[in-house]
Each structure stands twice: as C-alpha cells, then as structure tokens.
Amino acid sequence: MKNKLQLILKYLRQGTLQKMWRQTLWIYQYGRRYWKSMILYTLLGITGSCVSLVSSLISKDLVDIITGHQTGKLLSTFAAMIGFSIANILVSQASGYASTFISLKVDSEIKNDIFAKILITDWESLTDYHTGDLVTRWSSDASNISSGILNWIPNLIIYTFRFISALAVVLYYDPTFALFALLGIPFSALMSRPLLRRMRNNNEKSAAMNAKMYGFNQEAFSNIQTIKAFDLIQFYTEKLKSLQTEYIGMRLEFQRMSILTSVLMSIVGFIVSYSCYGWGIYRVWSNVISYGTMTMFLSLSGTLTSSVNSLASLVPSAISLTISAGRLMDIVEMPQEDYSQDDAVNTFEKKYRSEGFGLSMEHLNYTYRSGTHVFADASLEAYPHEIVALVGPSGEGKTTMLRLILSLLYAQSGTFHICAGQNHEKQVPMSPSTRKLFSYVPQGNTMFSGTIAENMRNVKPDATDEEIVEALKLACAWDFVEQLPDGIQSVVKERGGGFSEGQAQRLSIARALLRKSPILLLDEATSALDVATERKVLRNIMQDTYPRTCIVTTHRPTVLNICTRVYAIRDKKCEVLDEVEIEKMMREF
Ligand SMILES: Nc1ncnc2c1ncn2[C@@H]1O[C@H](COP(=O)(O)OP(=O)(O)OP(=O)(O)O)[C@@H](O)[C@H]1O
C-alpha cells in the first residue's frame, strides 16, 4: 500500500497524472454533448447482453430436456432458442448500424469543430507546426477522440453489466464454478502495470511517426517538379526507404510486444477454459449439476473471460485517447485570434464603404518570436485610389508588413488604423476583424483546381459571367482566357497547372479584383509578368472607378513611376522615396 502511494506521488510529481486528468476533462467537454447517443449505444449493448444471457439459459433447458434431466416442451424451448438467437443477431446488427451512424456523425462534428478552431488560431503560433503534423492531428487524433467518446463509457457500462450478469447466474447455480472462471483476473492485474507504461510510449511514438510519414509524403508529392529538376529522385527514394525502415522497426517492436501479451493471455485463457471444463465434468460426474448447467457454465465462462479482457482493453484505449487529446490540445489551446471587433467593423464598413477605406500605421515596432527584429518606429499610410509600392532588398520586411496589415502578426507597439472620411478622421483599429476589408494576392501560385469561373466564384459566389469577364479584363487576363475553347469554363489544374506563371498570376489578381475589397494587397503578384503587362495591370487598377486602396510589393522599379507613393523598406523603417530617388532606382535597374 505504501509502495503504491509512493508510485502515485511519483507520477503526480512528474505531472503525468495531472496531464492525463486535464486531457480527460478536455475529452469530457466534448463527450457531454453526445450523452443521448451514448445512452442509446449503451442500451443497445445491454439489450444484446440480456438476449445472449437468456439464450444461454434456454440452451441449458434444451440440453436438460434432451438428456432427460428436465421435463418440458422440447419444441417450444427449441423455438425459443432459435428466436433468441435470431434476436441476438438482429440486436447486434442494429447496434452496429446505430453505432456506425452515430460515430460518423460525431466524427464529422468534432473534426469540423477542431478545423474551425485551427483556422482561428494565431497564425504565427501555427507556423511552428509542419502542415503534415497538423493534418495528422486533425484527422487521426480527432477520429480517435470521436470513437473514444462514443465507445469508452458505454463499453465500460456494457462490459461491466455483461460481467456482473453472467457472474450472478454462475453464482446462483454453482459458486465454486465462478472461482475457476475468474482465475485469469489476478494475472491480468499483474501484467497491467508494465504494459501501461509501454503502451503510452508506443502510442506517442506511433503518432509522431505517422505525422513524420504524412509530412514527407505531402511535401514530396507537391514538389515532384523540384525533385525531378534537381535530380533528387534517388535521394527521395532513399529517404522514403529509410523512413519506412524506421516505421517497420517501430511496428515490429509493437508487434513483438503484442505477441508476448497475446501468448500470455492465450495461455491463461487455455488454463481457465480447461479448468472450467474439468470442473464442469467433475460436477456432472458427481451428479451436482446437469449437462445443461455444464453447457451453460462453459458458455458463461467464455462471457466472463471475454468481458474481463474487454474491460482490460479499455485501459490502452483510454491511454491512446488521452494522448490524442493532448496532441489536439497542443493545437486548439494555442492563442486564438480576437474577432471581438466584428460588429464594430461591420457597422464601420456599412457606414463608409462607398467612400473607400485607407490605412495608417505609425511608430510600428515588430520582432518575430524567433528574435528577428524587422521594424523599428516604422510608419506607412495608403488611401483610396492610391497605389502604394513597398520596395527594398530581399529579406528587409515587405511581406512582414503585409502580414502586419492583415493582422496575421501583431506589432509589439505602434498605432494601426483602417480609416475613412475626407481627412481620414474616421478610424477603426486594425484587428483580425478588419481582415474582411482586404484582398490579398500572396507570392506563388494560389489558384485552386476547378474551372476559371469556379475559382472566381470562390471569392464571390453570386458573380455573374459579365462581372468575371470584367475582372479578367482589368487584370489583363481576358486576352488569353478569350482564346481558350472553353473560355471561363476552362479547367485549371492543381496550383494553377495548365497556365503559365504569369497567366496564373493574372487570374489570381482578377479573382482578388472581383471580390471588390476596399483594400488590395499584391505581394510580388506581378513578378512573372512582362514590364508592359505589369504596368497595364496596375494602371487598370488605378483607373478603375471603384474606390480601392492598393499596396504592392515589388522588386522592379519600372512600375514605380505610376505609383502614388513609394516606400523603401530599409534599416527597419519605411521611408517615402522622392521622384529623384525613384528615377535613380529606375536608371540603375
Ligand atoms: N515566419 C517567420 N518567422 C521568423 N522570421 C521570419 C518569418 N518570416 C520572415 N522572417 C524574417 O523576417 C525578415 C523579413 O522577411 P520578409 O519575408 O518580410 O522579407 P521580404 O522583404 O518580403 O523578402 P523578399 O523580398 O525576399 O520576399 C527576414 O529576415 C526573414 O528571415
């Protein structure tokens, strides 16, 4: 007892128990909304146990009638037994169907909930995780939780009920038989402690390995072109082989542990069933019990052993559940974005949208959590009908500025507002709630698979064909879309496949223009266009009557002289360039 207490204290000190308790509470938060489903599932299970118990009793009567120990109606007993066997099949099938239905429903609901939580998690915190790891946590860990929620407590009740009811019948007919049937329990208890520790380790290792494999596959398949271009086929094939070797090693280690456990359990199972068998024959031979009772005992001893094993199997499933909960908690308990300003921003938007919105950022200081200091006392402003350019050497902070504008990152100090009105005097602070006022075209290809029209309607579901064509014209994309046999119904493959880089960029810009957001952010979004087309796209945006504020980052000074204002991002500041400096940059380009 003292040793046990010391062990518990040791676990408490290490925090394992507290961690498991917190994880269990987290699962409970989810589980309690599904109590009705759990009750239904439990009732089905208990009904199944009752039906099979009654079947055992009827089969006892049947054997006794046949062997002459009991007088009764053979035909009606036989019919009852058939009836209960059929009922048994029906109940177990109905229970299977109901549990599949409920588990699919619960699984989708939990996945939706966690997906939504991941999407509102602070962006910078989320970038600490590999996307492969995130997907594995969201898919397999969430599935584990949903099936656990649905099965664990009901199964605990069902198996306990099955065990107690079978034990009660055995005790009623012959208490000594119960001793034999329960021989295996002390052994299971003895084995449980070392097994538990290894199971928890195995589960953690397995989850980490799955995430690693998924991450590798995802990266490899989305970069086939780069793998080929750098002649990395051999390297990647070897890398996959080494990951697979690691995976196989891990699985075989688990398998060895599982074989050892199963062999020991089977030996105990054999000892238990042969002892029951021997004891049953002895009791029949001593005329204490009938053949029928012996048949019933044998079937009930099977029920008792299987109930104990099923109850024992709930322990590893609880461990695996808490581990999955822990992995999901890592994600959903990260800081979340604050959308509390949604109503204020909606009101602000309704009131001033027709005039357009600008933005002003003053005395901005920003350092990434990794320690990279990007801005110190930087200021920037942009207003409707302006195109503001951000230029500067690579790595100075242009993309970081756009992320700050979008409130994907939060500056350590400074003032940041979206503004409206003649003198920009109407203001609302920048926050995740103001993100809806922006359209952002990031670097790289951002088209989805589907048709051009579907891609466009992703951002504006009710857009007419005319509106789509209008946006394509503004982005100088209509020239090539018009030539395609299927026009706006032409198919775009994954990541803009089937189109040149410059064409895909123009489609992305058209999509952003179609959305008619008050503020448009283009991050090197025209880098793949020739200079003439790039200038034309920017001119079109400038001349559009819609009161749009446009901020572009670019490495090419050739477009700077059509911009309203040019900021050079250097020495952690945003400095407005005058015409002389712009001319100088253009000459030196
Ligand atoms: N997620 C991040 N975590 C930590 N540091 C980052 C992160 N993203 C960028 N940085 C660092 O911040 C600095 C500014 O990067 P940023 O991407 O804003 O530069 P940029 O001017 O847009 O560069 P480019 O012209 O090459 O696109 C760089 O030193 C970069 O290493």
Image: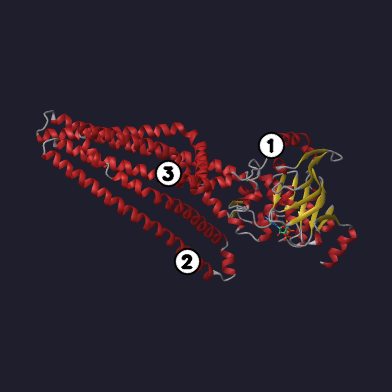
Which residue is denoted by mark 3 in the rendering?
A: 2
**Which quadrant would residue 61 be assigned to in this image?**
top left
Q: How crowded is mark 3: few (under 14 residues within 10 Å), some or many (20 or more)?
A: few
* 46 or 501: nearer the viewer: 46
> Measured from the top left, where is residue 250 in percent x and y?
44, 59
Callout 1: SS? loop
Determine whether, in the image, residue 134 is placed left or right of residue 574. Answer: left
Q: Earlier in the sequence, mark 1 or mark 3?
A: 3
- Counting labels gives 3
Image height of 175 relative to 446, above or below: above
Quarter of the N terminus within the rendering: top left
> Measured from the top left, where is residue 401 in percent x and y?
75, 52
Q: Which residue is drawn at 35% across and 50% down?
A: 191
Q: Which residue is drawn at 16% across and 34% down?
A: 62
Image height of 165 relative to 586, above or below: above
Residue kind at label 2, given as amino acid type:
Lys
Tell which quarter ligand 1 is in: bottom right
* 85 or 181: nearer the viewer: 181
* CA–CA distance in space, label 1 to label 3: 53 Å
Q: Which of marks 2 and 1 is nearer the N terminus?
A: 2
Q: Do the residues labelled 2 and 3 touch (CB within 8 Å)?
A: no
Which residue is denoted by mark 2 in the rendering?
A: 241
Q: Which residue lies furthest to the left in this view?
A: 68
Callout 2: SS? helix
Which residue is denoted by mark 1 in the rendering?
A: 340
Residue kind at label 3, given as amino acid type:
Lys
Determine whether, in the image, residue 399 is placed left or right of residue 147. Answer: right
Q: Residue furthest front?
A: 2
- Residue 268: give its label: none
Q: Residues within 10 Å of mark 2 (few under 14, many from 20)?
A: few
